[in-house]
Amino acid sequence: MPVKFSIDSLLNSYFERTPRSRAIFARAEALFPNGVTHVGRFLEPYPVYVERAEASRKWDVDGNEYVDFFGGHGALLLGHCHPEVTAAVQSQATRGAHFGASHELEVEWGALIQQMVPSAERLRFTISGTEATHLAIRLARAFTGRRKLVRFAGHFHGWHDHVAFPAGGAAGILPGIVEDTIVLPPNDEAALGEISPQAKEIAAVILEPTGATFGQVPTPPSFLHTLREWTAQHGVILIFDEVISGFRCAPGGAQQYYGVLPDLTTLAKIVAGGYPGAAVAGRKQILEVLDYRRVGDRIHSPLVMHQGTHNAGPISAAAGLATLRIIRDTDAVPRANRTASAIRDGMNAAIRKHGLPWRVYGQFSDFHLYLGEDAVSLEDLYAGRVSPGKLKGSAPLELIHQIRMGMLALGVDFINWPGGLVSAVHNSQDIDRTVTAFETLLQHLAPAPVTEGGAFAVSR
Ligand SMILES: Cc1ncc(COP(=O)(O)O)c(C=O)c1O
């Protein structure tokens, strides 16, 4: 039985602190599914509505302050409204939001990405990470002339049809796409060996190099090396989805940190400094399928046509450039890592004090909560010896909602994994406040059974 919360006092405090959010949510429910605009923002009994944000903090419409670990879904390594990023955006906004034309900033932005990301010989901008993985998979298929895609259970690559279903398929996905997709258990070398006979049909392998959900199910580095060898041996394109890990694990991303170079890389979030923007980067030869080709006196269409009204928008380019320059030139990455490590240590100490089997883990500027029944060791976890199913998807959603709501009532916003993404501007006060709030949350744990509908069977 999962641990249950005696949540009444925190729930009451949440209600008392957030009347305006509750009223806005009542309107939102009549507009959006579950009242939200992203599944990750769904929260029972209702989410808070945020009015403004600065550095590591944000404030809701009722004036409550939160230490923010949602971090713009990972886009804000430098925190909210970094002065240099904001100045770059403001300056660009007065010069134009969209030129319908090439502009110099996109070249500077692209050149900086090329300089920072080791495998980026060429790149193409898109708007979102979903678009980037979609394009990368299409490039791999066009380049190799093969159909199949290999990916790993639990690894997230956005919501387009080729990546948004578990093994076996899901509602709304065409059977042909399911047939051409091989979903392997993560980190499983034997499973990789088993598909070798069909390798000639495989266009690409895509994965989050840090492991599912930025290391919620960690990938042992040895598996990355194995994958690199296997894909090279079979002429399969290796795609690193660095939408979160890019510019966060290291200025050059997970590929720089682990010393394993993919053929294609997808980038989003930090790449555009918190504004909409993403990219596919990689081997020149592969990106050439996007080129118009001149044969004699005729121009031929590219093998892969790629459009997008907002590709490389000047405001995103300005924000991305300002952000990436800071990441290249300062200690932003190690600073965020150190802060995250202190938060993990503090939360684990609180867990030990309360005698729970839970764990807080992570390897970079992140933390994940393991909410299982049996204790796991951090060594086993990082070595890939804990079964992936235990680490991702096993915690009841009600428990996750209760933890998130309880932390909000205590002034901290966790991401829905549950866990957090830490920025370079979270400071020692943020660490103390988070650890203290988490300790208070644990004091509200009780072994009481939850009735049907969970603790939130309380009327709204
Ligand atoms: C690893 C990874 N890939 C792809 C995506 C999709 O990116 P976007 O939300 O920009 O479409 C995400 C988003 O969280 C992600 O974490």
Image: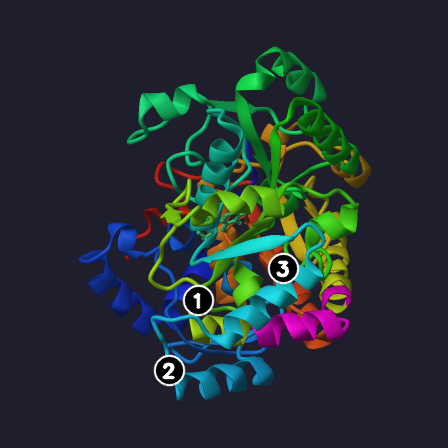
In the image, what residue occupies the spot 60% across and 24% down? Answer: 185
Name the amino acid type tagged 1. Answer: Ser
Q: Helix, strand or loop at disc 1?
A: helix
Name the amino acid type tagged 3. Answer: Phe
Q: Nearer the viewer, residue 165 or 315?
A: 315
The answer to whether 354 is drawn above or below residue 176 in the figure is below
Q: Identify the disc placed on residue 13.
A: 1
The reply to whether the residue tagged 2 has its Cβ within 8 angstroms of ligand 1 is no
Q: Helix, strand or loop at disc 2?
A: loop
Percent across and percent down for residue 121 are 65, 53
In the image, what residue occupies the spot 53% across and 60% down? Answer: 269
Q: Is residue 73 magenta?
A: no
Name the amino acid type tagged 2. Answer: Gly
Q: Which residue is mark 3?
A: 438
Query: Does label 1 or label 2 sit earlier along the sequence?
Result: 1
Select label 3 or label 1 by which is in front: 3
Percent across and percent down for residue 46 are 35, 58
Q: Quadrant of residue 184?
A: top right
